[in-house]
Amino acid sequence: MNNFDLKSYREFLFSKYARQYARLQYSYVVKYGFMLEQPNEIDKLPTSIKSNVLKSLVNLAKFLGQYESFKSKLKNYGIKWSSSDKRARLLPQWRIAYSLNPLFFRTIFIQHYFKQNPKALSEKILSFLPKLEDALIC
């Protein structure tokens, strides 16, 4: 990693971002800053921290005036920002929704499921109609 003044970088982050986010970005640069020069190591990171490390490296590259160079290195190494599995990205959001309100979560999940699988919805409605008729006759 290039030698640079960590103190001035920290001041840069705290002047640009909220305290907690700046602190997170700074800690990632301290730990993973060497990846600015070795971007092939980024793919070895767990997916849970990969995007945060990339964000912190981008901030560092911008601070050092090496953003375009870093961006081309990422492209050359074929490093992507996120996973291609959409379900894996949605899972934390689903967990939060469920923990806040299980009934609301089930409603949203069912709406999402049937929007993705309209044939399943029509089959469920057709299977429900005879039960509805029986309930109305009584």
Image (tube, helix red, strand yellow):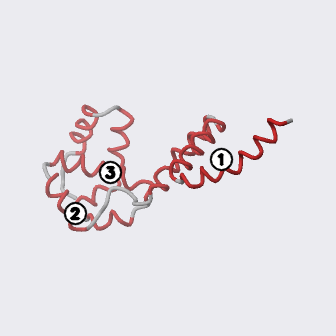
**Tag 2 residue:** 75
Sequence-first disc among 1 and 3: 3
Q: Which mark is residue 125?
A: 1
Foreground label between 3 and 2: 2
SS class, disc 2: helix
Foreground label between 1 and 2: 1
Viewer-nearest residue: 61 or 116: 116
Q: Farthest right residue?
A: 138
Residue 124 place in picture, x, y as percent: 66, 50
Q: Quadrant of the N terminus?
A: bottom left
Residue 87 place in picture, x, y as percent: 49, 55
Kindly indicate whether the residue at mark 2 contacts the one at mark 3 (C-beta within 8 angstroms): no
Q: Amino acid at mark 3?
A: Val
> Could you tell whether 135 is left or right of 18 in the image?
right
Residue shown at the point (86%, 35%) measured from the top left: 138
Task: Please rate how many residues cluster around mark 2, counting C-alpha atoms within 10 Å: few if below 14, some from 14 to 19, many from 20.
Answer: few
**Tag 3 residue:** 30
Viewer-nearest residue: 95 or 14: 95
> Could you tell whether 48 is left or right of 125 in the image?
left
Sequence-first disc among 1 and 2: 2
Q: Is residue 85 above or below residue 59?
A: below
Sequence-first disc among 3 and 2: 3
Residue shown at the point (20%, 51%) measured from the top left: 61
Residue 83 place in picture, x, y as percent: 40, 59
Q: Quadrant of residue 11?
A: top left
Residue 72 place in picture, x, y as percent: 17, 61
Foreground label between 1 and 3: 1
Q: CA distance from mark 3 to mark 2?
A: 23 Å
Viewer-nearest residue: 73 or 3: 73
Q: Amino acid at mark 2?
A: Lys
